[in-house]
Amino acid sequence: MKRYLIFGALGPFVGGLLLLLATSYLSGYWAHTDLMEVKKFVVVLFKSLQYSYLFGLLPALMMAAIDEIICHIRPIGPRVRMLIVGLIGFTATAFLYSNRGADMGSLQFVLYGVVGLVPAMLSSWLAERYCPPVVPKTTEGASA
């Protein structure tokens, strides 16, 4: 259950932050940066945070379910699991977001892919660290 809480709490926040960074970078917002522009960015981040959770909670919980399933496959270690979950997140968000707008290219594909990669891998790493998989106990000496 902790795994789902980690993914649900962290995923939409980090994903919303990275999505706002990617869209503002692609629009040229960071061309002339000063303190007021950073302040506007932070204000927009916290005003749009509710929408990040509204639209990002279900995908984050789906990634938690994928992480949980892969966690129970014995030959797959934690690093490979984080990589698999990150690649699934990268692919899903890159294909979902990068086909929008006039600028379709590799930079847009990679920036929007990172929006799914980073929260998925970060949440998977934290889930591995704070809620390791439960190993079923075997009963020794019990006769069949």
Image (cartoon, rainbow, N blue to C red):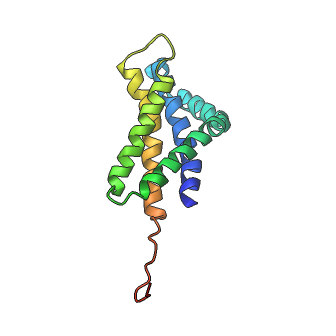
Residue most extreme to the top: 102
Report x, y in % for residue 36.
Answer: 56, 28
45 relative position to 23: left or right? right
The residue lying toward the viewer, choosing from 85 and 21, is: 85
Q: How many labels does the image show?
A: 0
Report x, y in % for residue 139.
Answer: 44, 83
Residue most extreme to the front: 144
User: Which residue occupies 47% across, 27% down?
Assistant: 22
Asked if residue 33 shows in the view, the reply is no
Report x, y in % for residue 25.
Answer: 46, 23
Which of the image's four quarters has the N terminus? bottom right
Which of the image's four quarters has the C terminus? bottom left
Asked if residue 67 shows in the view, the reply is yes
Is 5 drawn above or below residue 32 in the view shown? below
The residue lying toward the viewer, choosing from 49 and 29, is: 49
User: Which residue occupies 49% across, 34% down?
Assistant: 18
129 relative position to 6: left or right? left
User: Which residue occupies 44% across, 49% down?
Assistant: 122
Which quadrant of the structure image shows residue 90? top left
Which quadrant of the structure image shows residue 83? top left
Is 71 drawn above or below residue 105 in the view shown? below
Which quadrant of the structure image shows residue 76? bottom left
The residue lying toward the viewer, choosing from 77 and 12, is: 77
Report x, y in % for residue 47.
Answer: 67, 34
